[in-house]
Image (cartoon, grey):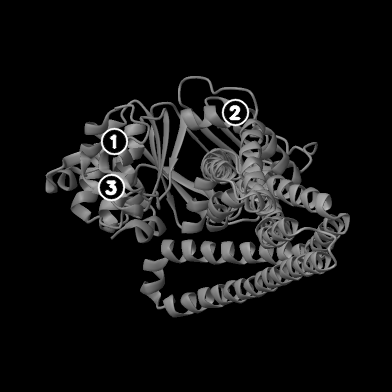
Amino acid sequence: MKTPDTERPRPGAAILRTALRRNVGAMIAGTVLMGLYQAAETAFPIALGLIVEHTMQDRSLGSLAISIGSLAVIITTVSLSWRFGMRVLQKANTTEAHRWRVRVAACGLQPVARDVDLKSGEILTIATEDADQTADIIEVVPLLISSLVAVAVAAVALSLADLRLGLLVIVGTVAILSVLAVMSKRIGASTQEQQARVARAGAKVADLIIGLRPLHGFGGNHAAFGSYRRVSTDAKRQAITVAKVNGVYAGTALALNAVLAAAVSLTAGWLAFEGRITIGELVMAVGLAQFIMEPLKMFSEMPKYVMIARASAERMALVLTARPVTTPGPEHPEPGGELEVDGVRHGTLRGATFTVTAGEFVAIAAYQPRAAADLAAVLAVNVAPHSYEGVVRVGGREVADLSIESVREHLLVNPYDGEIFAGTLRTNIDPSGTGRAIEAAVEASMLTDVVALHREGLDYAIRDRGANLSGGQRQRLSLARALAADAEVLVLHDPTTAVDAVTEQLIARNVAKLRRGRTTLVLTSSPALLDAADRVLVLDEGVITAEDTHRNLLAGDEAYCRAVAR
């Protein structure tokens, strides 16, 4: 496997362009409807001015009826265009956010890890909050254009009354947006930092939840909570900073909009006093001055949302454009199920070499627990093949030359801390719903008592992380899932550390029986599993130092006896 060096990171701006391009149709429809809404709203004070100008002068019931009908049409247009315009835009927004959430989640679930310095809690924040905020760009653009339509219609209408009024609106709008554009840059930078700190706090929470039991065990919970408090406090302080910046931005926008509206009203009043515009035009100008505050407010807020969307897109780009740690090969393992480790040096491993032939049940007694963890990581391809010395072969082919998918289909490594998911016993044992040998796996893992204990049986609801199960029950459930997969090569890492001796003995016999004829490797110090194995390998100081049956090693190797005897 080789590390790719040709892929160039895609910036957040490219993610925003992709979101916009995918939703052109919805954005055009939304822009038309929202533009119609803003135009109809702008037409309302213009219509009032015309009513005052003509209807009240003529004092005609026909003219009054036409005026009332015109206002009813305008109000209906305002209501329907807003309702359907926002429906189109929010549907597109929600759909696009879903697409980005799925893409970020897919990156996190890919079999080849990505070279990104983010924890699972941070990726969760990116897949939720950042995905939503990035998708907001779909609403921002149509609202921005529709607000511009409203300001343009108001400027044209005022220019028809007096050119100075129209120019005042145009110049004032440009000045307001110039000031707010500068302020929005700080909002974007502050928001990006806030999102990063919130994500770090989320990652810390995830770590604490996973390690809560061990922390309580040796009294480290207070120090851990103190660490989280510091991270959370940093996030809180940054959130307050962002709130202050947003408050200053909103206050400045409102003040500038009010100044422009007041300037238009006062100018119109002066022009009416001088006799340069009529009373109807004065009513229209004052009405438009009041009205344009709303589109101007919306218009002035859009740069802020654009900067927030871009900051979120940049964080998503950290995940979506991260290079994979390795590039998988194209080959597939040969059938048979042989597993070979040849001179592997990684972590505490110092040239470990051994072979598990097809259909053999082998146990490895690691005197140093860290060595067993390092070996499990290498076999699970959690460590890139190019990052360690030596070779691992599956089915006669080097792992470096195999596709990750074929390795996963051929070789299953079940960790000692296998995750339990919210769902049922059945969905945890058979996540893909293929209906494979669930009953046999339940019996072999001695999970039958858990199934029998509940009326729902295998459909008994399991909480997130198996919160309603004991440690031993979670471990047996994880083992059942590994056995049900019926992999050609199965590696189990300490599968019985949380069960009693009697259950452990039964599990050892059941696993050996169920896996007969299938290649199985168990990393364990359990006497029951060691005794059930065809042969035992001793892993000491990173190398294989002895090989024999469990009973022969007990009889002739004092160090082995001290390490595994209970």
Q: Which residue is mark 1?
A: 512
Q: Is residue 115 visible?
A: no
Looking at the picture, tell me which residue is in the foreground, 429 or 331: 429
What residue do we see at 77% from left, 49% from top?
157
- Mark 2–mark 3 distance (CA, rounded to whole Å): 30 Å
First in sequence, mark 2 or 3: give its number.
2
First in sequence, mark 1 or 3: give its number.
3
Looking at the picture, tell me which residue is in the foreground, 171 or 551: 171
- Mark 1–mark 3 distance (CA, rounded to whole Å): 15 Å
Which residue type does callout 2 highlight?
Ser
Looking at the picture, tell me which residue is in the foreground, 213 or 510: 213
First in sequence, mark 2 or 1: give its number.
2
User: Neighbour class for label 1 at 10 Å: few (<14), some, many (≥20)?
Assistant: some
Q: Which residue is mark 3?
A: 476
Residue 69, picture quadrant:
top right
Horizontal relation, residue 343 to residue 531: left or right: right
Q: Is residue 24 above or below residue 126?
A: above
Percent across and percent down for residue 17 are 73, 40
The disc label shown at residue 403, or none: 2
The disc label shown at residue 101, or none: none
SS of the residue under disc 3: helix
Which residue type does callout 3 highlight?
Arg
Instruction: Look at the numbered discs 2 and 1 and tell me whether their residues touch, using CB distance below 8 Å.
Output: no
Percent across and percent down for residue 282 are 74, 61
Which mark is nearer the camera, 2 or 1? 2
SS of the residue under disc 2: loop
Horizontal relation, residue 237 to residue 509: left or right: right
